Amino acid sequence: MATHVITGAGSGIGAAVARRLAERGDELWLWARDAGRARELAQHFPGARTLVGDLAEPERLSWALGHQSPPDRIDSLVHSAGVVDLAGVGELTPRIWQATLAANLVAPAELTRLLLPQLRAARGHVVFVNSGAGLRASPQWSAYAASKHGLKALADALRGEEAPGGVRVTTVYPGRTATPMQEKVHRQEGKDYDPERWLTADAVATTVLTALDLPRGAEVTDLTVRPAE
């Protein structure tokens, strides 16, 4: 039985990944921003354990984790949490930039740093659920795309650093996916939201599990998945 730590398991892609892993009997440790959210996750995923820390404040994650007992070995760390606020460069304030970079880039970097000993012990796997915006930036998407471009750089550097010890690193770049975040994006864009047009969260979860399930000695570094035309 493998042990997985998952952020963003409350909805969307993270919830789909958690559900799929739970269905096959793996051990889940779900990251929650506060104690109330942790209780909700525990109720939604019976048998799962939780870890609490606000990803919006990455500088406090070390303190938060130091007051908890994470698993001794971690087979995978799946980064699925994220935030998005669309606006032109001329309208984006430092507060929005800092909040976006904190949650989407600095927090994954810090959480990975804190859990690297357990990942190294298991020769585990780090999966970054990125975005098509991590490969190209469009108007109004500068803050989000910058955070996701940075996440790609983090993954690439981490892969080179940890490969000698057997830790694998995969980045998944989903296209538009039918999630609550996507619904928020459509509101910000002033567009009607039709979830039937987009990828399902379960399709992206299948992509994540495909990377996780590769036999030892094989590694998928980057996977792009898009809605079929």
Image (cartoon, rainbow, N blue to C red):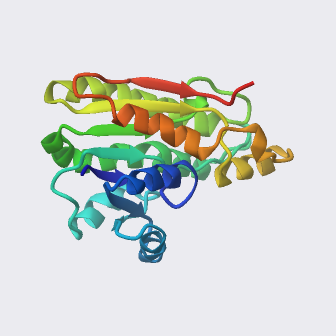
Residue 154 in view? no
Q: Would residue 219 appear left or right of 80 to someone viewing this image?
A: left
Q: Is 6 in front, or is 66?
A: 6
**Quadrant assignment, res 75:** top left
The residue at 28%/31% (across/down) is 168
Residue 81 % position (x, y):
49, 51
Q: Nearer the viewer, residue 12 or 24?
A: 24
Let me know if residue 63 appears in the view: yes
Residue 210 in the image, given as x and y percentages of width and height: 42, 33
Residue at 60% across / 29% down in the picture? 132
Single out the residue that lies furthest toward the front: 24
Residue 87 horizontal side relative to residue 17, left or right: right
Q: Is residue 93 above or below residue 198?
A: below
Residue drawn at 20 percent across, 59 percent down: 71
Q: Residue at x 66, y 38 (%)?
A: 199
Q: How many numbered circles are shown?
A: 0
Q: Which of the 4 image quarters holds residue 162?
A: top left
